[in-house]
Image: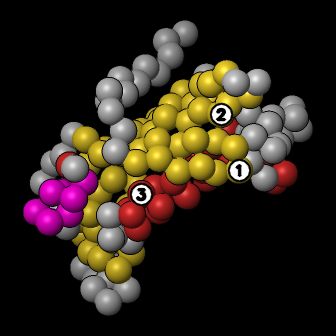
């Protein structure tokens, strides 16, 4: 069976630490696949806030929606681990961009790959319920 392959960028412009919570752990005793997506979401929010943006601007009723997601699982993470999540933007279009994620943890002085991911983000106008253009200002911030 063919597996998804992600080509991550060489450099990531942002990183954050996220602790594994008990609710992130599944019956197998490790972080569940659904929790990885939630961790990516939290990392995306922190990345955007770092750049001065939000996913939904309530004053203009515009924001970002996730059009697609791909995750490859590389290793286990457990309750108590601190996940380092690196995020960067790439592959810009007139209406959106891709966000890439690299998730690792450190145990016994070893860096352990946990997951890699990509989300396709599309600008969206909630007033017209249609996609919107990516602003030049936001693109410039994301490209840094």
Position of residue 90 relative to residue 95, above or below, is above
Q: Secondary structure at mark 2?
A: strand
Q: Residues within 10 Å of mark 3 (few under 14, many from 20)?
A: many
* Horizontal relation, residue 75 to residue 55: left or right: right
Q: Would you name the residue on which mark 1 appears? A: 19
Query: Main SS type for the magenta part?
Result: helix
Q: Residues within 10 Å of mark 2 (few under 14, many from 20)?
A: many
* Residue 129 visible within the image: no
Position of residue 53 relative to residue 104, above or below, is below
Q: Which residues are magenta?
A: 135-142
Q: Secondary structure at mark 3?
A: helix
Q: Residue furthest top?
A: 1
* Horizontal relation, residue 90 to residue 58: left or right: left
Residue 16: x and y in percent read 53, 50
CA distance for labels 3 and 2: 19 Å
Residue 143: x and y in percent read 20, 49
Q: Would you name the residue on which mark 3 appears? A: 47
Q: Secondary structure at mark 1?
A: strand
Does the magenta segment cover residue 141?
yes
Position of residue 120 relative to residue 10, above or below, is below
Residue 116: x and y in percent read 51, 31
Does the magenta segment cover residue 106?
no
Sequence-first disc among 3 and 1? 1
Residue 18: x and y in percent read 64, 51
């Amino acid at each position: 069976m063919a597996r998804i392959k992600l080509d991550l960028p060489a450099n990531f412009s942002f990183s954050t630490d996220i602790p594994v919570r008990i609710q992130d752990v599944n019956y197998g005793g490790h972080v569940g696949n659904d929790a990885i997506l939630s961790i990516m979401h939290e990392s995306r929010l922190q990345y955007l806030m770092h750049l001065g943006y939000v996913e939904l601007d309530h004053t203009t009723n515009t924001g970002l929606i996730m059009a697609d997601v791909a995750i490859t699982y590389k290793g286990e993470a457990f309750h108590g681990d601190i996940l380092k999540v690196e995020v960067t933007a790439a592959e810009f279009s007139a209406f959106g961009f891709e966000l890439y994620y690299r998730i690792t943890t450190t145990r016994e002085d070893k860096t352990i790959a946990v997951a890699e991911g990509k989300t396709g983000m599309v600008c969206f106008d909630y007033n017209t319920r249609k996609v919107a253009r990516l602003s030049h200002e936001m693109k410039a911030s994301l490209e840094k």
